[in-house]
Image: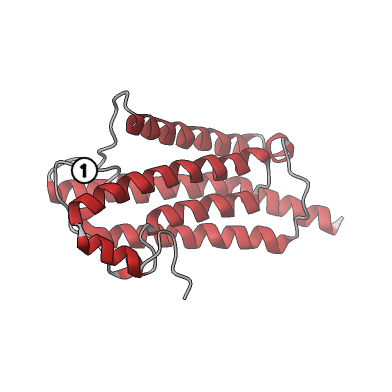
Amino acid sequence: MKFVRNYNHMTDFIRFFIPFYFILFFTVSFVGISYKVAKQIGKNPDVLPKDDSAYGLVGFYFKLILSALFIYTMLLLLFPEDIFSAFKINIPEPDAVKYSGLAIMILALIWVITAQLQMKNSWRIGIDSTTKTDLVTRGLFRFSRNPIFLGMTMSLFGFFLVVPTVIAFSFLIIGGMLMQIQIRLEEEYLQKEHGEIYTAYKKRVKRMLNLY
């Protein structure tokens, strides 16, 4: 009975924590930061294309995944018993794994917001080909060329540890693939814009994380 009570307490906590977390994540790191930068540069930093190009398609799928993630977290909140058990992956689930997942999610949020603030006016959602921005190599960018995408990936990984379902795993895999495509598009643009400076930066810092 004690195990059941503890399990129910954990489930209740998770069902409220997950939607609150993702709402906070995107409200602060996208809406809030974007608003702050928009006031400073005088234009919307969301420059993802809305056309029928391949790049536009990547942006569309990003928004689709975010919408699906929001709906899934709301379903977790409203129908926890059904959603937690739906498409569940049968792996051992000690509390330590769930606590680790929660910790990873919280650290990922702090990491992403820190990286965005360190970008200052260079922060963009997408590739801004109309304005040349500074190449940011300080702070977290000393350890990762793409700390924001790294943090977003880690948040989805933590989510999967907390809610080990096929759906959560799909968010991790599909979201990770879209981010890797976006990373390569952005790095190609940065290479053209910053030339040898960016080449030297790539030699010093790995795409996702320097493990030293």
The quarter of the picture where residue 146 lies is bottom left
Nearer-the-camera pick, 33 or 164: 164
Nearer-the-camera pick, 28 or 145: 145
The quarter of the picture where residue 51 lies is top left
- In the image, what residue occupies the spot 25% across and 47% down? 189
Picture coordinates of residue 206, whole percent (x, y): 40, 64
* Residue holding disc 1: 128
Picture coordinates of residue 137, whole percent (x, y): 27, 66
The single residue placed furthest to the top in the displayed view is 52
Q: Is residue 162 left or right of residue 181?
A: right
Q: Is residue 135 left or right of residue 180?
A: left
Nearer-the-camera pick, 60 or 26: 60
Picture coordinates of residue 78, whole percent (x, y): 62, 35
**Does residue 123 appear in the picture of this structure?**
no
**Does residue 104 appear in the picture of this structure?**
yes
- In the image, what residue occupies the spot 33% across and 30% down? 56
Of the residues shown, which amino acid type is indicated by label 1?
A: Asp
- In the image, what residue occupies the spot 71% across and 53% down? 9
Quadrant location, the N terminus: bottom right
| Disc 1, SS | loop
